Image (cartoon, rainbow, N blue to C red):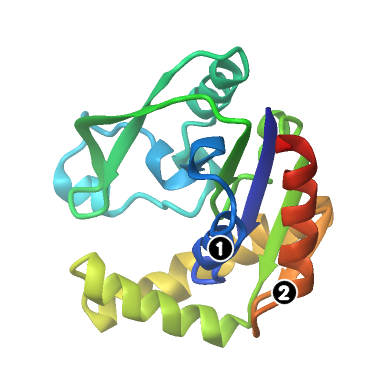
Amino acid sequence: MLIIGIAGGTGSGKTTVVQQIINELPETEVGVISQDSYYRENNNLSFEERGLINFDHPRAIDFELLVSHLTELKKGNTIEQPVYSFVTHNRTDDSIITHPRKVMIVEGILILANAELRDMFDVKIFVHADSDERLIRRLKRDIAERGRDMEEVLNRYQTTLKPMHQQFIEPTKAFADIIIPNDKYNTVAIDVVRAVINQRIT
């Protein structure tokens, strides 16, 4: 199993890069795991308390579960990926049955910040985007998809997202094998990644 880690700041375009990579690959041979599914369970907290959690800090992620799930997939076992709700700030009772694939892509803002997880990646990618561009994308997404208002998103960006990005996310660029600038459609970088994958699955 080839495991590819795709990191980058919030709104950097990680999901777009994932789509560009898997678009021309056989669906049965590539799987995707999102770090967003692995936020810790917070059943012991009230809705208001959960809303105050710093979701951009590594401790908000259940890396232990993510590592154990990847380990199981490598062994050829099926896993039950958790489902996380950004509306309730908590895991739901649902899960996604995920089967092992020849290629597993793991994407998320903090996936290169954890040494144990990082060591599992055969290829490490960092998607870089201008901070203004990332803020605009985050604003649009959180208002449209997560029921936030503009003031709330901007406040969270200034107090949490920006400092966490500078402290925990941007430095992980140093661990990347490939850095993809997402200010334009970067066909060369995508083609390099596809070539690596094709080598493994053919």
The residue to which callout 2 is attached is 187
In the figure, residue 165 lies in which quadrant?
bottom right
Residue 51 in the image: state x and y as whole percent: 25, 53
Q: Is residue 75 visible?
A: yes
* Residue found 57% across the figure and 43% down from its top: 106
Along the line of sight, the residue nearer the viewer: 123 or 1: 1
Q: Earlier in the sequence, mark 2 or mark 1?
A: 1
Residue 163 in the image: state x and y as whole percent: 57, 67
Q: Secondary structure at mark 1?
A: helix
Residue 49 in the image: state x and y as whole percent: 23, 46
Q: Looking at numbered disc 2 in the image, what kind of residue is underneath it?
A: Thr
Where is 108 relative to 151, above or below?
above
* Residue found 44% across the figure and 73% down from its top: 157
Question: Distance of mark 2 from mark 1, alpha carbons?
Answer: 14 Å
Where is 186 relative to 23, above or below?
below
Residue 114 in the image: state x and y as whole percent: 66, 37
Q: Is residue 154 visible?
A: no
Q: Is the residue marked by circle 1 packed among few (<14), some (14-19), or many (20+) residues within 10 Å? A: many
Q: Is the residue marked by circle 2 packed among few (<14), some (14-19), or many (20+) residues within 10 Å? A: few
Q: Secondary structure at mark 2?
A: helix
Q: Looking at numbered disc 1 in the image, what kind of residue is underneath it?
A: Lys
Please state if 175 lies on the left or on the right of 37 as rendered: right
Where is 70 relative to 56, above or below?
above
The residue to which callout 1 is attached is 14
* Residue found 54% across the figure and 31% down from its top: 63
Please state if 176 lies on the left or on the right of 144 as rendered: right
Residue, far front:
202
